Structure formats: C-alpha cells, structure tokens
Image (cartoon, rainbow, N blue to C red):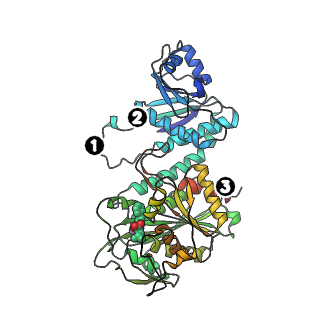
Amino acid sequence: MKISFATPRMPRSGTIVCIVMDDRKLSPSAEKLDKDSGGALTRAIGASRFTGKSDETLQVLSPANLDVARVLLVGVGKPRPGDRNPRQNRGGVILAALNALGEKKAAMFVDIQKGVEIALAAADMAYGARLRSYRFDKYRTKEKPEQKPSLQELTFLVDDPKAAEKEFAPLDKIAEGVFFTRDLVSEPPNVIYPETLSAEAKKLAALGVQVEILDEKQMKKLGMNMLLGVGVGSVRPSRLVVMQWKGNPRAANKAPVAFLGKGVTFDTGGISIKPAGGMEDMKWDMGGAGVVIGLMKALAGRKAKVNVVGICGCVENMPSGSAQRPGDIVTSMSGQTVEVINTDAEGRLVLGDALWYCQGRFKPQFMVNLATLTGAIIVALGHEYAGFFANNDELADKLTAAGKAVDEKLWRMPLGDAYDKMIDSDAADMRNIAGGRDAGSIVAAQFLQRFVNGVPWAHLDIAGTTWSKKDAATVPKGATAFGVRLLDRFVTDNYEGK
Ligand code: BES
Ligand code: MN
Ligand code: ZN
C-alpha cells in the first residue's frame, strides 16, 4: 500500500475521508462537501447513530454532485493536541474501514488543526494505517484477489505535505522494524530455526549494523554450556547473534546500551515435553529475539544517534536421544552450576548465558532482556500488560514511561531474597525451577538476575503480549512485535545524542 501526502485538492475518484468532531461538528472539508452535495452528509448523519465520537465511522455512498464513490466520515471526539496514540489508532481504524468497504484508493482531509500539529497529526495517522496494514500471507496460495486487502493508495491532504513527510519518515522506519519482527515471529518453525534466524539478523549489515554470529564451537569455547544444553536435543545447531549499531561515534568510548532476546525457535519442552494441544504456538517462543532484531532495524533505519548492542540466544528445544535430561547439571559461562529439573524452563538457561556474556564483553550501561518466558505471566496479567522486573528503579521508571507513551503497557513485578531462595538446589548452585507453581514468573526472573552481575537490568516477560488473537487498531491479529515501539521510544527519550 502506498502512503503519501499532498496539498488539499478535491479527489475525483475513490473515497474521501473527512473528520467529524463531537456533537456532529463537521471539519471544514466535510462542511464544504455537505454544501456541494445538497446536505447529503448531514442527512446521512441524521439518519444514523454517528455522532462524531472517537473512531466512529459512517460511509455516505455516491453523494450527489460529487465525482467520488463515497465519503467516509471519521469521528475524532474532542481532539487534544499532542494526543498521539489516539491519532495513530485512528489511522489504523480508517485503514481497516477502507479495506472492509473494498476501496482501492482514498484521500483524507486533515484540516482541524494548524501548523506543526497538523503535519504531526497526518504523520501519526499514516503511521497507524501502515502498522495496521501488516499481513502475513505468503503461504496462502489459493487466496483470490477479492479476499486480499483492497486499499492500494492512501493520501493525506495537508497544507504542508513536506512537513508531514518529514515527521513520517522516522515513523515509517520504526514500522519497518515492527514488520520485520512480525515476519520473523509469524514464520513457521521449519523455516525459522537458529541458523535461519541468525541469517535474517545478518541482513541488517546492509543498514550498517555490525553482526557477528557465534556458532556452537565458539560458544563452547566461551563456556556457554547452559545455553548449549537446551539445543543438544535438536538437529538444528544453536547460534548466538551479536549486533552492534554505532550511531553515536562521539560517545564511542562510553558504555553502550544493551538489549537481549530469547530466541527459542521452537519449544517442545524437551524431555519435559509439553502437551500436544496448542504446542504450535511455541513457534513464537523466539518473540524476544524477534523484537531485538526488529528494534535494531528500526534504530539503524532511522539512524538513531545511540550506541546499541543487541544479543539473541537462538536455540531449538527438542526431545531426542541426545536431549538434556531432567537432573542434568550444567556449568554456565559464569561458572555457576545449574541443576536442570525441568527442560521446559529453557528460556532462562539461554538468557542466563547471554546476559553473562553481554555484561562481560560490552560493560553496558544497562541490559534489558525480552522473553516469552512464563505461562504464569499470562495467568497474572493476561494479554494487556507485559510483566517486567528490574533491579534498578530509574531504569524501571523510564521503561514504564516509554510503554505508556506508545501504548505498549508494562506492569512491574517484585524481586526479592525470599523468591531467590526458592531456586537454591542441594545438588548444584541453583536449580532452574522452584518446584511448586507459586510465583512462577518471579522465580524465572530471579534465575535471570543471578546472571546479571549487578549491572542495571530489566526483564520483560512478553509471553502474553507477543501474539494476539484479535485485531487491535494498529496491531492486526497475529504477531504483535510488542516491544519494538516501546524500546525505540525508550531509546529516543533517554539515550539519543543530539
Ligand atoms: N515458552 C514457555 C513459556 C510460554 C508459555 C510462552 C505459554 C508463551 C505461552 C517457557 O519456556 C515455558 O515452558 N515455561 C514454563 C516454565 C515452567 C516449566 C516452570 C511454563 O511457563 O509453564
Ligand atoms: Mn519451555
Ligand atoms: Zn520457552
């Protein structure tokens, strides 16, 4: 779908989209169209329940005296300047409505604000429309054209299209990162496995990201037995992806920021095998890695002035004759020994070594990891908030604020010594589960914390937010890429040089 910005002119075909505010107050363009059509718009509104509340829509088909097929009225309620999320959502709602109507081409008058705010409003709606337009359909070979989304061209009509384009450019780069993540997460597990996932990350080299891929031999040499143990049951060899974006050369000798992702490309549970029902969902157990790779694409794409490290532990968790057994004891890169009681608690094993490697090699300002780590976080928070844990209040507050700003919401959960004790083991330095079902997400976080070596750190448990079963305004059902927009914003607000 092509998105563009142009100066206001009356379209002669397709759909015209116009804004209506609370209490049926027409925007200037709607008012003009209403006059030109002999009051067709006010009559249609009067005959409906449309009042101009936020995200209500009403289509008026072939209004008299106009060349276009229809006018689509979109409610914006009482718009407040600076209210960016509602505008982005509106763009998504408009895109979905136009596709539902089967329209190919539409132009929207953005004419209820002035100056800078209007350029930003148009860019926000364009961004929302772009985000909603995502579709993963490469394996649907029998889909007829009429089953595919119809909209091909969406134009926003604004006084200063150049200013709107300038606002939209970085947003479009973030959307590219989001789409990359959604693609990686949507791909089936016979297509995306550690080698192919790391090969996808390698493609970021074209944007100037330095990408190293560590193979099993290199990881073995580093002592990453805890990560490697998860992959030994699979015929697919494990990989560690190490990405660096050096967007702020002036801060080259300062500590970088670091993001890490769980990249379990399929989680059967291993010998502690999962039940068959719903196991296919475990293709998205690499969601954390997908977000880190998409985030690097967004940051490099918009040339963010920041030095970032992105690390993904990529493994496949399979049962087999060579698989890790419950009861195995492995020595992690940190030297700490771990009794693997349950091979399905594998994400923490992968991330533990990745975190240790990251802090040792890069001495980062902080580390933020993302992982589809526990079913328990879904029990606690459902699919609205991602749970998160932090050993540092300032980092926690910055993440919470960024989540609010982009509407990818985080809810902080506690850490503490009493929880930490729950993973003490009689046979080794620790075990990978507590034994009971209590505080499952917290226990997993405590395990990770034993590998951060005191560095400021946060862990985002995105098990409930990585995949969605229903459409939302800017997120079609399926892979959400939850975390890309959040962390992009977190970087922009706190760590980007001028
Ligand atoms: N990948 C799963 C967590 C998960 C569950 C993500 C459902 C998304 C949806 C993780 O590796 C896992 O299996 N966790 C276990 C931990 C348990 C064995 C302590 C869980 O949550 O049941
Ligand atoms: Mn598991
Ligand atoms: Zn898992």
Numbered disc total: 3
Which of label 2 and label 3 is nearer to you? 3
**Residue farthest to the bottom, as pictured:** 427
Q: Height in image: 76 above or below 369?
A: above
Name the quadrant where ligand 2 sits: bottom left
Label 2: which residue? Answer: 150
Instruction: Please name the amino acid that badge 1 sits on.
Output: Lys
Left or right of 316, for residue 356: right
Q: Are marks 3 and 1 in contact (CB under 8 Å)?
A: no
Q: Crowding at label 1, few (<14), some or many (≥20) Cα neighbours within 10 Å?
A: few
Quadrant of the image occupied by residue 355: bottom right
Label 3: which residue? Answer: 493
> How far is disc 2 from disc 3 in space, using C-alphas?
37 Å
> How far is disc 1 from disc 2 in space, using C-alphas?
17 Å
Q: Disc 1 or 2, which lies upstream in sequence?
A: 1
Which residue does the image show at 53% across and 82% down from the upper left? 334
Q: Disc 2 or 3, which lies upstream in sequence?
A: 2
Element carrying mark 2: loop
Which disc, if any, is residue 127?
none
Instruction: Please name the amino acid that badge 2 sits on.
Output: Ser
Image quadrant containing the C terminus: bottom right
Q: Height in image: 2 above or below 366?
A: above
Which residue does the image show at 37% across and 69% down from the upper left? 316
Is residue 315 at least partly visible in the picture?
Answer: no
Which of label 3 and label 1 is nearer to you? 3
Instruction: Please name the amino acid that badge 3 sits on.
Output: Asp
Residue 54 point in image, percent of width and height: 55, 34
Left or right of 152, for residue 278: left
Label 1: which residue? Answer: 142
> How far is disc 3 from disc 1 in space, using C-alphas?
45 Å
